[in-house]
Image (spheres, grey):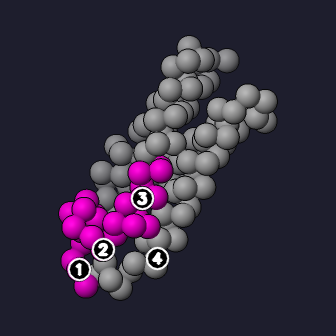
Amino acid sequence: MTIIANIATTFVALLHLWFLVLEMFFWDKPLGLKTFRLTPEFAKASKSLAANQGLYNGFLAAGLLWSLWPGSPAGLAEFFLGCVIVAGVYGGCTVSRKIWWVQALPAGLALACVFLAR
């Protein structure tokens, strides 16, 4: 079960690295406009906010990857997966319900795997 938990945690980390790339580098490009359903005007006006948001997603990914490193502190995966779940639930309530499925659900499943691996 540990292998499944590590794979699930890695998947969530990779999702957040992808979110970083989308928000920091493609926010005002065709891929970002389509992904986030933005107008070019809104994307231009909110580009620095999106880059900041992308950076935070990178921190979440870094923490999740750190949790997989041999000798990492106990509870690290649980903490960072919990942060992802909270962010996903909040985003789902305030921005788009799609965020529940794309962010909160994968993190919740990964957290369940981490708990079952103990």
The three-letter amino acid code for the residue at tag 3 is Val
Q: Secondary structure at mark 4?
A: helix
Q: Amino acid at mark 2?
A: Asp
The tag on residue 49 is 4
- Separation of residues labelled 1 and 4 (CA atoms): 15 Å
Amino acid type of disc 4? Leu
Is residue 67 placed above or below 27 in the rendered structure? above
Q: Which one is earlier in the sequence, the residue at label 2 or at label 1? A: 2
Q: CA distance from mark 3 to mark 4?
A: 14 Å
The residue mark sitting in front, 1 or 3, is: 3
Q: Residue at x 61, y 40 (%)?
A: 65
Q: Circle 3 is placed at which residue position?
A: 21
Label 1 residue SS:
helix
Question: What distance separates the C-alpha of mark 2 from that of mark 1?
Answer: 6 Å
> Label 3 near label 1: C-beta < 8 Å?
no
Q: Is residue 83 left or right of residue 17?
A: right
Query: Along the polypeptide, which appears first: circle 1 or circle 3?
Result: 3
- Residue located 67% across and 40% down the image: 66
Tell whether 104 sits left or right of 99.
right
Q: Quadrant of the C terminus?
A: top right
Place residue 67 in its image quadrant.
top right
In the picture of the structure, the residue carrying the numbered disc 2 is 28
For label 1, the residue is 40
Q: Disc 4 to disc 2, how far (Cα)?
A: 12 Å
Residue 112, horizontal then vertical, whole percent:
53, 27
| Residue farthest along the top direction in this orientation | 1
The magenta segment is 16-41
Q: Residues within 10 Å of mark 3 (few under 14, many from 20)?
A: some
Q: Residue at x 32, y 83 (%)?
A: 44
- Does dot 2 land on a helix, a strand or a loop? loop
Q: Is residue 69 magenta?
A: no
